Amino acid sequence: MTTPPPPILVLRGDPRALGRQQGAALRAQIHRNVAELLGALMKARPARREQIQAWQARLRAFCFDHWPWLQEEMAGLAESAGLDRETIELLNFRAWQYDVYHAGACSSLAVPDAHGHILTAGTLDDPRHLYAVVQCQPTAGLRYLSFPIAGTTWANRGMNESGLALGISSLICPGVKFDLSHLVPADLVFRFMLQYCGTVAAIESACRSYKFFCNLVAVDRHGGLFACSRYGDGLTVYPAAPAGAVLTNHPLEPAATALRARGFTGTDPGADSLERLAELTAWNTAHTGRATIADARALLGGESKFGRVNNPNTAFATIAVPQTDPHTLWLAQQPVMAEGFQAFDVRTGESVR
């Protein structure tokens, strides 16, 4: 038995058209997501609601000032899905995690193959039923393929037509104090990155420009590799080692030391982040200079030894080698199996294998 290929939703046109197409295609899923993710919020006490509304107003001003096209896309989503704009904004701004930026178990890696080309791979770990697989063809910017929660204008793990592959992992920092008035939704930053960034230099610039919480690994078609932890006002860029890069869900040094000054109590022992990091680092070391797509498929589609890289929450896994195939993203959906990977053209959303 092999996991079927994921359905690809192709969106084309100006921002409002992109929103309308998603809203029409995923209307039922969007309503389920609103009920599941925002239901408790809608019943919150008035004082709590006032806090969130003020937070929402700040984000609306910031996001629509920096990325004005998102306002039109969210408006199209609301119209087509039959929801009010405030609800769609709350979904896009991740309001169900208001003041909670600790979630997820994603993994990201990059490793050179036999020719020195960088293979990048990893997982998106979250409930599969919340997500769609979207290939976006905007009238402005780059075409890309990524995995938004249905009802959002997000991007995250994915690849664009410039051959930029993006891998992200939640940055879980128990005890850290952060200022809600300065944080930006990471998922909207990732959307900007995939639509408008073609190189790792552009990714680094975006990471320095926007304050969000996440670990990130990016690889471009020129052989560039960028890995970092972004934690609100702080940014730690990790130097690329001979064995590439691996990030799971906790900060590495010197980011960990910087975060301890802000209350970081250490890696959450229940999240298996240290184990995932050790497992993937060992894999990277063993495959440096010889990694192949088949190796990565076996890693991500197999049973994890002890770090739960492929775990019950692994919704999607991706693999790319931008230098040799700048338009191809291999992906598999839950349950991720080595045989379940299929290659897609990020410019069209069509299968290429």
Image (tube, rainbow, N blue to C red):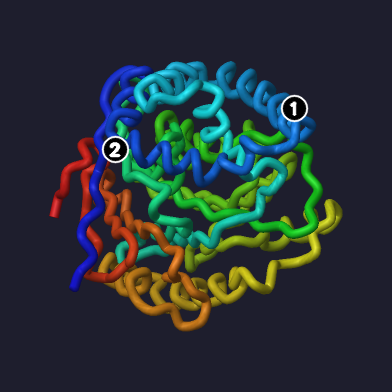
Question: Could you tell me which quadrant the N terminus lies in?
Answer: bottom left
Secondary structure at badge 2 equals strand
Tell me the crowding category of disc 2: few under 14, some 14 to 19, or many 20 or more residues within 10 angstroms, Cα based.
many
The answer to which quarter of the image holds residue 15 is: top left
User: Which residue is found at the position 71% from the left and 57% from the top?
Assistant: 173
Relative side of 151 to 180, left or right: left
The answer to which quarter of the image holds residue 239 is: bottom right
Badge 1 amino acid: Glu
Tell me the crowding category of disc 1: few under 14, some 14 to 19, or many 20 or more residues within 10 angstroms, Cα based.
few
Q: Percent from the top left, x then y, of residue 305?
A: 46, 83
Residue, disc 2 = 135
Q: Percent from the top left, x then y, of residue 269?
A: 68, 73
Relative side of 199 to 228, left or right: left
Badge 2 amino acid: Gln
Q: Percent from the top left, x then y, of residue 292?
A: 29, 68
The answer to which quarter of the image holds residue 31 is: top left
Nearer to us of marks 1 and 2 is 1
In this orientation, does residue 224 appear?
Answer: no
Q: Percent from the top left, x then y, of residue 194?
A: 42, 36
Mark sitting earlier along the chain (1/2): 1
Residue, disc 1 = 50
**300 vs 296, nearest the viewer:** 300
CA distance for labels 1 and 2? 36 Å
User: Which residue is found at the position 49% from the left and 38% from the top?
Assistant: 34
Question: Could you tell me which quadrant the C terminus lies in?
Answer: bottom left
In this orientation, does residue 74 appear?
Answer: yes
